[in-house]
Image (spheres, rainbow, N blue to C red):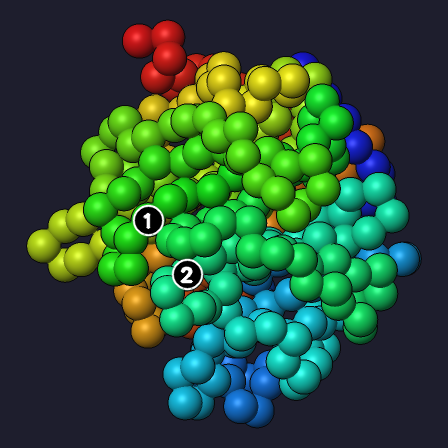
Amino acid sequence: MARILGENIENLPWEEKPEGYKYPVWRYSGNPIITRDNLFFANSIFNSAVVPFKDSFAGVFRVDDRRRNQVIVTGFSNDAINWELDDKVIFKGYDPRICKIEDRYYLSWVNLTPHGTTIGIAETKDFKVWEQKEDATYPVARNGVLFPRKINGEYVLLVRPCDRGHTPYGDIFIQRSPDLNYWGNYRFVMKPERNWEMTKVGAGPTPIETDEGWLLFYHGVITSCNGFTYSMGATVLDRDEPWKVLHRADSFLLAPHEIYETVGDVPNVVFPCAALSDAKSGRIAIYYGAADTSVALAFTTVDETMEYIHQHDLLKE
C-alpha cells in the first residue's frame, strides 16, 4: 500500500466513492463549488489553488473579470468547500498554484508581460502581504508548479515552455534554483504519449510526496474537430531526481463528462490545479477548473490512484 509522506489534514473535505463506481477519481456531488457568483465583478472563477492555513484553508483564485482581464485574488474557508473570496487583486495573470515550503507559502502563476507569459513567484506568511520574486522563466512559459520542499538543497519547479500562442510546445521540464532568484539546471521530464494528451501536457497540483515517489496529477490535451479537450492524468516521479518518470498511467483519470465541464466559456475542460492530501487516511481532494468557468472538486485515495497507475503503466508496455 502506498503511503503519503506529509501532514495530516483531519478536516480535509471528503465524500465517499459512489457505490458501483469503477474509476479511481470521483466527483463531488455538490459541484461546482465556486462560480462567478462568488465575486460581484467576475465573469468566471476557475483554475485555482488551495492549501491548509492555520486551522482552516486559504487559496488563490483565478478570476476573469467582466472586462475579461485575468487577475488573482485570495480566499478563505473553514471546510475547503464553502469559500469567501476577497475582491482585492493581488496579481495580474492566471492559473495560480500555491504550496508551503518550511514556514512560508509560495505562489506561482502565469505572469503577463509585454514579451509573453512568464512564471511569477511570490511568497507570503499570512496571505495579506506578498513579496514578489524575479520571474522564474523569461519568456515564454506556463504551468509553473513548485515542489513542496527543497530537493538536494534546491527549489524545484515544473514548467512547460511555450510560445506566445496556444502552443505547439507540449512538454514538461524541470528547473532548479538555490534561492528562488536564479534558475537553471534544466531537465526534460515528459512529453505527450497517448491520444488523449497528444497536443500537450502540463503539471497540475503541487506534487504529493509518497513512499513510492512524487505523485503528480497533470493535464493532457487532445485536439479534435471541436477544439481542445483537457483531461487529468497521473504519473510518479523519482523523489531525489524528479525529472525521472517511474510510472505513468496510459489513460486519463478524469475527463470532461458533466455539464459544468463540457459547457462554459471554454467547453470540455478538466484542469487540475490543487490537491489536499491527508497522510493518515491517504485521502486526496483535487480541485480543478471546469470549462474555464467554475471550480469543481473530486476525490481519490493514494492507494486507488497508485493502483490504477501500476495497472495501466505505459512504461511497462
Q: Is residue 310 visible?
A: yes
Work out which residue is located at the far front of the displayed protein and give it: 182
Location of mark 1 (residue): 162
Residue 117 numbered tag? 2
Q: Which part of the image, by quadrant, shows the N terminus?
A: top right
Q: Position of residue 214 (x, y in %)?
A: 61, 26
> Which residue lies at the image location 35% right of the left edge and 17% below the top edge?
314
> Which residue lies at the image location 90% right of the left edge and 57% below the top edge?
55
> Which residue lies at the image location 65% right of the left edge and 48% below the top edge?
181
Query: Mark 2 packing: few (<14 Cα in 10 Å), some, or many (20+)?
Result: many
Instruction: State if disc 2 and disc 1 touch (CB < 8 Å).
Output: yes
Q: Secondary structure at mark 2?
A: strand
Q: Which part of the image, by quadrant, shows the C terminus?
A: top left
30 or 159, nearer to the observer: 159
196 or 263, nearer to the observer: 196
Work out which residue is located at the far top of the displayed protein and give it: 316
Marks 1 and 2 sit apart, C-alpha to C-alpha, by 9 Å
Q: Secondary structure at mark 1?
A: loop
